[in-house]
Image (spheres, grey):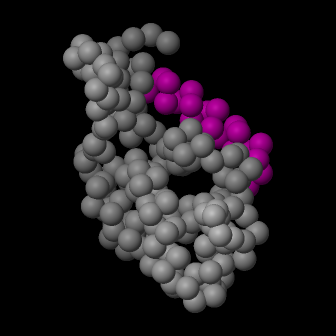
Amino acid sequence: MEGRALTDKELMFEVKDGDLDKLGVLFERHHRALYSFLLRLTGSVEAAEDILQEVFLRLLKYRHTYRGDSEFVVWMFRIARNARADHFRKNRLASSDDQEEELVSTNLSPDDEVEKSQTFDLVHAALNKLGADDREVLLLSRFHEIKYKEIAEMLGCLEGTVKARVHRATKRLRDAFYQLSGERA
């Protein structure tokens, strides 16, 4: 194993076997993407941070249940979905208007930066107009590039169902975007 990085599955099996330091490696690999997912899903910085912390606590707490039947990220996102549901059930929070900070590219002109920022804001607003289920499948499939098969496993449905949900959610996102921008599709 010298010379190559351990896979997520290998790391999680080591965590399961008691090497708890390996959870730190998994955290470093996945916390940004998971935080981004949770932020977009909840619309709240505070909720996303709380749920992120809860996810990694649950990974530690339920490490003995990890079987490695699917990709680690599928298991992790399933735990994140449950933690999010529990968080909102427990706290009965409404989504806030907190927004994720956008990384600014130095390669764009000021006019292009403004246009990019406006487009980002419109997409973000359109995404927030969608229902939680639509937002979730789009975030998983488009922003985090998780395969339909893995999303179906996460959601406990057929792959074809996920494809149909993504297709409908994409159409709703496009409609919401055009409605907000005042443009026509």
Q: From what the image shows, is residue 183 above or below residue 63?
A: above
List the single residue furthest toward the front: 3
Main secondary structure type of the part rendered in magenta: helix
From the top left corner, tell me how far across and down residue 73 is, in percent.
60, 60
Residue 42 inside the magenta-drawn segment: no
Up-down relation of residue 180 to residue 126 (above or below): above
- Closer to us: 105 or 50: 105
Horizontal and vertical percent for residue 159?
Answer: 76, 47
Can residue 137 be seen from the camera position used here?
no
Whether residue 164 appears in this view of the structure is: yes
Q: Write down the region rendered in magenta.
A: 157-176
Which quadrant is home to the N terminus?
Answer: bottom right
Q: Looking at the image, which residue is at 68% across and 46% down?
A: 147
Q: How many marks?
A: 0
Where is residue 154? Give x, y as percent.
66, 59
- What residue do we see at 51% from left, 67% from top? 26
The residue positioned farthest toward the bottom in the image shown: 18
